Amino acid sequence: MRALEQPLLAVQQLTSGTLTVKYRPLMPEDFHAVKAAHAALFPIDYDDAFFHKATNGLDRIWSCAAFAAAGPYAEEQLVGFITAKTVFLHECEVSDRQHMGLLSPVVDHDTSLYILTLGVLEGFRGRGIASSLIQAASQRACETRCRALFLHVITYNTQAMGLYSMQGFACVARLSRFYFISTGRQPDPNTQVYDAYLYVQYVGGAAGLATPWDVLSLALSPVRSALARIHSCMPGFCRQQQLQQYPAGDCFPDSSTVAGEAAAAAANGSRTSNNKEIAVVDVRNSEEFSSGRVKGALNLDSTSFSDNSLIDKLVDQLQFKSQVVVHCAKSLQRGPQSAAALKQRLQELGINKQVLVMDGGFEKFGELYGSDSSVVEGGAAPKLAAAAAAAAAAAGVPSEEH
Ligand SMILES: CC(C)(COP(=O)(O)OP(=O)(O)OC[C@H]1O[C@@H](n2cnc3c(N)ncnc32)[C@H](O)[C@@H]1OP(=O)(O)O)[C@@H](O)C(=O)NCCC(=O)NCCS
């Protein structure tokens, strides 16, 4: 699809004062430079898979990098970058969509451009490089007919916030407990949890509140955002209100619940090469696992999550995955607890991955997808299989053995 392609290589040259700056997409040879720049500029670690995707234009990631020389005899180097991901609105957090006024199902299959990272090396700042990079992203969003360009920024980053305001972004929400930073590079090493602001720039200048659904959703948004805030303050296993969508491409996301749809997408990905970034981890015991599972799911019994060496083996298998969907039978106890242990271990190891709990566990997944052999293997949940057999018997149809 045209909207998801990386643009052709284009080099643009601009002069900021006495500095000549060239702009072009990131390329594979920029891997080490852009990785070093991220490590120098951000308090969080990104894994190599992210830099691989960003420098190869994979996984719907678009980029623009700035190159300049520090002096007349100095070599040209990477001095700034912006990376962004094209996301369908149905892939975004429901609360983000609410805050942006883009919740209508009418726009579910429209796209937005989500800014993942933006940075300019010290010594090259205050010359409009970040502004030019943001303008390149705005242009990209416009050319690919995105609805909006949006991002999250940590609440202490006043410099970046000033920049976004100057570039025509609106701050539409404060999201509590959005970032968890344990690298020690945060401003206060004793504080690991930080809020974020959500900034949005609408393509064409307005949210386009065209449908009655949009108007209703806007009217309800204060109530919903209050609920969302309460929801995000609670630990995963205490949350009653479950998210119906799954987020994609978040920079530093908080853990949350996710609908079975994400696991189905991951299972489909094992067939179609899509959604290869999502891994499904089933924490039921081996008997439960072998009686039916999400296709391609990994299995680690919840009792093993007290042993770091076993978690580390699982982490090795997750190397190329950016999102991990964890579940047990109902995802009430074992799933959320194992997800919390996995998340904690990833943080200790300095690995950035999103860990989500699948809403309703394998039982609910089986109800939704039990009959689809492309996403379930070894049979659906036992309860579902029994119900299906009973329904088949009632209808006089011989039931299938799995
Ligand atoms: C935030 C950051 C990206 C800004 O980069 P930058 O290239 O300095 O940004 P710009 O030059 O476009 O704009 C910064 C300032 O320079 C001013 N400026 C813009 N063009 C200018 C020019 N041609 N000459 C002089 N000043 C200029 C802007 O008005 C702005 O002024 P302000 O700070 O008073 O608002 C940079 O500080 C950074 O990398 N920070 C660390 C990483 C980070 O926080 N990233 C954002 C994560 S959300």
Image: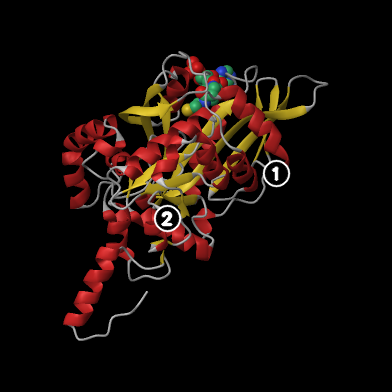
Q: Nearer the viewer, mark 1 or mark 2?
A: 2
Q: Along the horizontal axis of the image, is 72 left or right of 166?
A: right
Q: Secondary structure at mark 1?
A: helix
Residue 356: x percent and y percent?
Answer: 38, 43
Within 8 Å of ligand 1, the CB of disc 2? no
- Residue 148 visible in the displayed image: no
Which numbered disc flags the more N-terminal residue, 1 or 2? 1
| Residue bearing mark 1 | 28
Nearer to us in this view, 327 or 382 = 382
| Residue bearing mark 2 | 286
Label 2: how many Cα within 10 Å (few below 14, some 14–19, many 20+):
few
Residue 195: x percent and y percent?
Answer: 36, 24
Q: Secondary structure at mark 2?
A: helix
The disc label shown at residue 382, or none: none
Which residue is rendered at x = 50% and y = 37% of the image?
116
In the picture shown, does residue 341 fall above or below 288?
above
Seen as rendered, the residue at the extreme right is: 73
Amino acid bearing label 2:
Ser
Q: Along the horizontal axis of the image, is 303 left or right of 315?
A: left
Nearer to us in this view, 225 or 44 = 44
In the picture shown, does residue 401 fall above or below 242?
below
Which residue is rendered at x = 51% and y = 28% of the image?
348
Q: Along the horizontal axis of the image, is 17 left or right of 328?
A: right
Residue 106: x percent and y percent?
Answer: 29, 56
Within 8 Å of ligand 1, the CB of disc 1? no
In the picture shown, does residue 167 fall above or below 136?
above
Distance of label 1 from label 2 (alpha carbons): 41 Å
- Residue 230 visible in the displayed image: yes
Nearer to us in this view, 57 or 45 = 45
Which residue is rendered at x = 60% and y = 43% of the image?
49
Amino acid bearing label 1:
Pro
